[in-house]
Amino acid sequence: MSSPGPIVVGVALFFGRSSTQLADFIRRTAELMAIIVSLVVFRILNKNIPSDLSQKEKLERTANLFVGAAMCLSGSAIIFVALFSPAMERGNVIPGLIIATLGTIVNSWFFLRYRRLNREKPDAIFAVQSKLYLAKSLVDASVTTALAVVTVAPDAPATFYVDLGGSIIVGVYLIMNGIITIRGRSIESVHNKTMDIKNSMIEKDLRAMGIIMKIVPRILFTETGLRLLSKMPNKMGRKIKSDNLQVEEKWIPRKDGSKLRIRIFKPLEPVVNVPGFLWLHGGGYALGSPEQAAKTAQRLNRASKCVIIAPDYRLSTQAPYPAALEDCYQTLLWMKSHAQELGIRDNQLMVGGDSAGGGLAAALTLYARDKGEVAIAFQMPLYPMLDDRMRSNSSRDNNAPVWNSRSNYNCWKLYLGELFGSANVPSYAAPSRAADYSNLPPAATFVGELEPFRDEVIQYVENLRNAGVPVNFQIFPGCYHAFEQVCPKAEISQKAFAFIENSFRYAVENYFAEQKIG
């Protein structure tokens, strides 16, 4: 009713100049204007993604300032007219009354619907929408009451005060929402702030660390911070100690003649014909090292004996895309050609990783499929980083612990380099851009409900399933990014570890991919 509302109420002003009806006309006009401006900004941002986040934010701030100022001025004008034009003639206000009554009914229905959904399954989207429609229904109810009194007794002394009160309520409502909009939240776009993660939304065993880990990305995961962190000497893992695995370091050749460092994790006893798992570390493509794979290697070996190979692929701060993908693919080829030496069977070459490593694993399956040089039997991209466009609800305005929207933006910008913000980003860089998911290996993945990657992982799983690819998938409620690594002793983290082990065990028993001969 946002579109016809101002027209109907505006026409009604020719028949009944009620203070409340005039206020409602201004209110509905301001709300319609807010919707139009928001729609224009949305279309601009989605048609041409700004290459610089500051440009995007400037456009949004300008729109918010324009709409918010208009709403504040409208609200102030309403109150001024109501207080200083008391002799306004009242008459037929039935058209405005009908619109207000319909608004009360519709907005109340939406309020009750979202409140019920939020009670059945607490969700930030439902909670925000519930509050939005409650406010709208209360304002419409106030307008309905005032106009009903004007209709029944237009000349009664008490009607003046009821009419005055109705217009003031509308004016205050407009001013409040104008201030909220100027601060960055449009009344019709509150759902865009759906990932404002409160501590109460987080799984109880993860909350304490969540408070700390909400601060970390703000300080460290800026573009400057990432560059500085990547230059710090890596002291972890060069002396990995493990009671049940032997750890070896090798250097393998790249095509350009340089050397690529890899870590190999093997059971202590000699192995023959076990799966080979290429594991890619996380870190937003900008941080991390292959030594991070140590604990994952232990868990995978607990499920089924295997050999894990983790490359020290080039980080985005050293070289942007496609350097990391090339290093991972080179490791995969080396793994295939040295299968017998490593004690692995070449029909069970698997790839996996977490976060950016998960994104690389997904990209690697696309790349290997299209190159046709090596067959991958199984993929395990855990909460993978897949989509540079950041258009989904979960990826926008997400302030969750460990990894938020700003961190995500900064890392994509570093990884893609000159490609960032363009329409030319290949699917090998951002797998969510792929158009064809057929003939990819079976997959297993999970994601936290509160993290930025939630929606793109859900879409990736759906794309695989639509292409006939088997997928084992789970969403962990109340969980932020990499929760199982941040809080490994939490009960829900133990469930995530069980998911990894059970998925791998099933893959070892069921998934094979024969290599082409010659």
Image: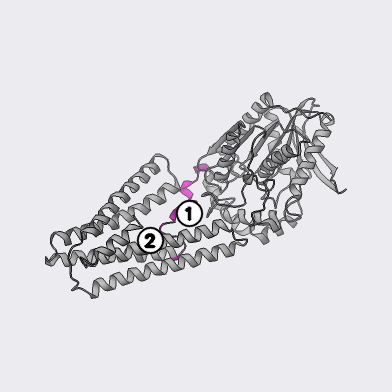
Q: Which amino acid type corresponds to the residue marked 1 in the rendered image?
A: Asn
Q: Please, is residue 426 above or below residue 410 in the view?
A: above
Q: Position of residue 70 (x, y in %)?
A: 39, 69
Q: Position of residue 420 (x, y in %)?
A: 66, 56
Residue 192, numbered circle: 1
Residue 206 located left or right of residue 30: right
Compare residues 313 and 221 and report the one nearer the observer: 313
Classify mark 2: helix, strand or loop: helix
Q: Which residues are magenta?
A: 182-205
Say whether residue 102 is magenta: no
Residue at 46%, 68% (x, y): give it. Answer: 65
Would you identify the image quadrant in which residue 330 lies?
top right
Give the label, 2 or 1, closer to the camera.
2
Residue 289 located left or right of residue 95: right
Q: Residues within 10 Å of mark 2 (few under 14, many from 20)?
A: some
Q: Residues within 10 Å of mark 1 (few under 14, many from 20)?
A: some
Classify mark 1: helix, strand or loop: helix
Q: Position of residue 489 (x, y in %)?
A: 59, 39
Compare residues 487 and 424 and report the one nearer the observer: 424
Q: Which amino acid type corresponds to the residue marked 2 in the rendered image?
A: Leu
Q: Position of residue 164 (x, y in %)?
A: 22, 67
The residue indicated by pointer 2 is 32
As drawn, which residue projects farthest toward the right?
A: 257
Compare residues 212 and 386 and report the one nearer the observer: 386
Task: Give the alpha-carbon distance from disc 2 to disc 1, as whole Å.
Answer: 18 Å
